[in-house]
Image: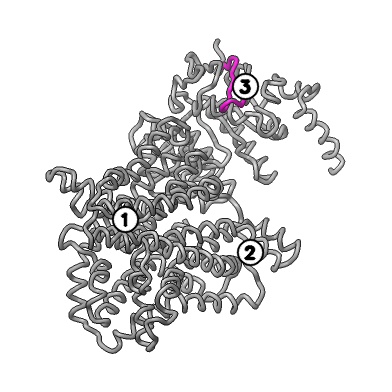
């Protein structure tokens, strides 16, 4: 059986400056993947390539049976890739209500207006927002805004959900609550997650697998807990060095 | 289906779009180059007195630049750092001279001189009179640029300056940080006076702008007017371009919204009364005294019927010119800003071109359109000899303001909005209709209102391009001011000021709405 996503020898550069090269990995259905690495290593760029927002400089991306990106080309546009994405700033459209944000996000869903409305309400309900559907994002709390963003992506029933550091800036209690809700929703909606983060703690909460990018290439990849036992990347080594301190505080 | 992601991607279409847009904006200069080759008679290339007129204009411009920066920079910074009673009201009053024709202020100063019994050689006439009239218009420009730049200082920067040396250190830090921007505004304010014929003519100190108008309207020498206009434009470009090229990237970046907490105002009790006193002193000089000059003859005699008749005759055209010009400028300005997007280089180029276009004499575009009209067949009169031509000429003059407001407004959108729309397959027209345009609408309305005010205040363009009999209210004032009774001129000026004040209040309310949403 083909993997859900196959990335082969992917490279990206802006102008003459290379961001990363030779990135190869597969994502199996249900095998949530964390993409880790220091700031500026190209994690978000990799996610944009998976989403079809940019074309790679080299290499190919397959989603399901189809090749979706080739060097310099987006072969399948973002909205035809059965993916969804939660952006770092959530990208909620500020002048629309929570319900309208979800409804407009369903532009490509083939259903009647009434059915779409029902689906959108269901998605909001699944995220615990049924009583906030008429509110605009600016009148919602950070946690509620995160949930609107989640409802918007769940309503389109994607196979792959890309999360671009959506938890930065949230307090630890809210993060924990959201992690548990996302895991539950991902399992109930059969969605595979790709989480971009620089915080291995977030990665361990949501993903079983990890890919660490450092200095323009994949430094290590595989089962996250296995990687944490014998880390070779500076990112994971630095994370482990912090752990005793945390225990000490406790 | 075109993906919304295209709005956030680089592409050659952006370069092509900006090139086409700027060519369109500068296109009227092309016929002007041809017109400059036309030689009537055997006079000198630029007319005998043009060099002296240029010298006078530069003397006024230099004084205006120095005075406006000297007064506008510290007061603007101080007002930007303070919160004081009647703030909105005083700021609105101070903005008034920016949005009305400069000759209105000169008329006010001239009438003030006569009503107070001063001689024709007093300081309210000649060189000093022209400087005073232009400073009244240029000072608010530097003041507001300084105030807005000060407001751009983040809370973190302000607190760091406070910790290092208290409120006085914060003031010094703000002054240093705002100085380059204020200096550019001062240079721009000075340059804008170079081609403005009104105040010099009224106060007896004619400069280059008046010489160009005379060559065209009194000597009927189009070639001479074109050469003089091109010479003046070249000098303007020589002054403005280096400054703009050096500073445009920085300004373009500062127009992108930053997510920073605004600075906390100075909480010293002194500012509660000092800031309003300072502002009110400037307002007395820039608004109250010229307005008092306009009111004095009206108090003696108010020709209500003549005023009503004149306003009725000119109001429809004034509104048509203003609406059409602001419509063209706003649509083109927002389109150009959208095309430039977030690309730093294109934003800097667009901003630099906008500032140069704003600094160029308004006769630069108008004379070009006029010359194209004389060469074009009669079937194209609707394009070159019509209200549309006049409106297009006005639009090119106020386009830079629309571009700057648009760049600022588009800078407040998040790139991920369009990317999210792309991932969800939202059609481009739906993205524009439901997300982008509603978000930009307050800024678009604000740009349209301000462009309408600036277009109406541009008398030179209307004077050169209006179809026979289709005059506007400011032009009617400009043409009757030498012969009509002072009371009529004063009353017409006040009627114009009243209308401008109402529109300005509307613009202020819109600006507040745009900021709050």
Q: CA distance from mark 2 to mark 1?
A: 45 Å
Q: Residue B465: give x, y in percent of width and height.
A: 23, 56
* Discs 3 and 2 share one subunit: no
- Residue B44 placement: quadrant: bottom left
Helix, strand or loop status at disc 3: loop
- For the N terminus of chain B, the image quarter is top left
Asked if residue B42 lies left or right of residue B193, the reply is left
Dot in front, 1 or 3: 1
Estimate how packed mark 3 is, as few (under 14), some (14 to 19) or many (20 or more) residues with alpha carbons within 10 Å. some
* Discs 1 and 3 share one subunit: no
Estimate how packed mark 2 is, as few (under 14), some (14 to 19) or many (20 or more) residues with alpha carbons within 10 Å. some
Residue with the mark numbered 1: B363
Residue with the mark numbered 2: B264
Q: CA distance from mark 3 to mark 2?
A: 49 Å
Dot in front, 3 or 2: 2
Dot in front, 2 or 1: 1
Task: Read off the magenta span.
Answer: A6-17
Q: Main secondary structure of the magenta part?
A: strand
Q: How is the image coloured?
A: one colour
Front residue of this view, candidates B410 and A208: B410
Q: Chain of mark 1?
A: B
């Amino acid at each position: 059986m083909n993997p859900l996503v196959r990335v082969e020898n992917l490279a990206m550069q802006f102008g003459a400056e290379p961001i990363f090269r030779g990135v190869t990995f597969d994502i199996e259905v249900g095998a949530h993947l964390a993409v880790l690495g220091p700031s500026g290593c190209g994690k978000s760029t990799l996610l944009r390539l998976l989403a079809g927002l940019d074309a790679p400089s080299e290499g190919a991306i397959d989603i399901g049976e189809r090749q979706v990106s080739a060097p310099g080309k987006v072969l399948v546009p973002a909205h035809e890739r059965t993916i969804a994405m939660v952006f770092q700033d959530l990208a909620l459209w500020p002048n629309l209500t929570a319900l309208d944000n979800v409804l407009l996000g369903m532009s490509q869903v083939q259903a009647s207006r009434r059915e779409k409305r029902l689906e959108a309400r269901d998605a909001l309900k699944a995220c615990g927002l049924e009583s906030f559907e008429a509110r605009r994002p600016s009148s919602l709390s950070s946690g509620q805004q995160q949930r609107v963003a989640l409802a918007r992506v769940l309503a389109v029933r994607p196979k792959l959900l890309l999360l671009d550091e959506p938890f930065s800036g949230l307090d630890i209690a809210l993060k924990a609550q959201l992690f548990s809700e996302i895991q539950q929703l991902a399992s109930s909606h059969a969605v595979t997650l790709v989480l971009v983060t620089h915080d291995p703690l977030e990665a361990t909460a949501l993903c079983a697998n990890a890919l660490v990018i450092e200095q323009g290439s994949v430094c290590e990849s595989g089962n996250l807990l296995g990687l944490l036992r014998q880390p070779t990347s500076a990112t994971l080594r630095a994370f482990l060095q912090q752990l005793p301190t945390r225990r000490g505080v406790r | 289906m075109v993906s919304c992601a295209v709005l956030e991607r680089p592409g050659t279409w952006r370069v092509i779009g900006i090139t086409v847009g700027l060519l369109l904006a500068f296109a009227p200069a092309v016929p002007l180059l041809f017109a400059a080759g036309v030689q009537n008679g055997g006079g000198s290339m630029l007319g005998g007195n043009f060099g002296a007129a240029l010298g006078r204009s530069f003397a006024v411009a230099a004084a205006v630049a120095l005075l406006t920066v000297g007064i506008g920079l510290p007061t603007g910074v101080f007002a930007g750092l303070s919160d004081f009673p009647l703030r909105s009201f005083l700021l609105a009053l101070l903005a008034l001279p920016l949005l009305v024709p400069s000759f209105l202020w000169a008329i006010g100063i001239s009438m003030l001189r006569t009503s107070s019994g001063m001689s024709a050689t007093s300081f309210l006439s000649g060189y000093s009179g022209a400087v005073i009239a232009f400073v009244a218009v240029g000072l608010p420009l530097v003041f507001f640029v300084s105030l807005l730049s000060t407001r751009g200082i983040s809370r973190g920067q302000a607190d760091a300056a406070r910790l290092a040396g208290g409120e006085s250190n914060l003031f010094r830090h703000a002054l240093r940080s705002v100085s380059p921007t204020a200096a550019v505004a001062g240079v721009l304010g000075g340059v804008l006076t170079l081609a403005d014929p009104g105040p010099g003519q009224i106060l007896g100190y004619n400069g280059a702008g008046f010489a160009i108008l005379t060559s065209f309207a009194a000597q009927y020498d189009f070639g001479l007017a074109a050469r003089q206009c091109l010479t003046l434009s070249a000098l303007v470009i020589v002054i403005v371009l280096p400054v703009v090229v050096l500073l445009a990237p920085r300004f373009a970046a500062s127009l992108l919204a930053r997510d920073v907490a605004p600075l906390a105002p100075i909480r010293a009790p002194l500012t509660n009364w000092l800031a309003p006193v300072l502002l009110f002193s400037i307002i007395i000089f820039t608004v109250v005294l010229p307005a008092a000059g306009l009111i004095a003859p009206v108090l003696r005699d108010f020709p209500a019927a003549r005023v009503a008749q004149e306003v009725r005759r000119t109001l429809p055209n004034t509104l048509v010119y203003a609406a059409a010009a602001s419509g063209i400028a706003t649509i083109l300005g927002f389109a150009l800003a959208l095309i430039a997007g977030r690309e730093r280089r294109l934003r800097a180029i667009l901003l630099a071109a906008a500032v140069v276009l704003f600094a160029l004499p308004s006769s630069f575009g108008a004379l070009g359109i006029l010359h194209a009209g004389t060469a074009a067949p009669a079937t194209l009169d609707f394009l070159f000899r019509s209200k549309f031509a006049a409106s297009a000429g006005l639009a090119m003059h106020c386009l830079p303001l629309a571009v700057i407001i648009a760049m600022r407004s588009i800078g407040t959108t998040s790139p991920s909005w369009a990317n999210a729309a792309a991932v969800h397959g939202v059609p481009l027209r739906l993205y524009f209709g439901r997300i982008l345009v509603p978000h930009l609408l307050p800024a678009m309305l604000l740009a349209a209102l301000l462009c309408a005010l600036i277009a109406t205040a541009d008398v030179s363009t209307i004077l050169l391009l209006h179809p026979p009999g289709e005059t506007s209210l400011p032009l009617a004032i400009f043409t009757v001011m030498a012969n009509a009774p002072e009371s009529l001129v004063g009353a017409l000026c006040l009627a114009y000021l009243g209308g401008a004040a109402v529109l300005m209040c509307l613009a202020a309310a819109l600006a507040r709405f745009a900021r709050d949403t």
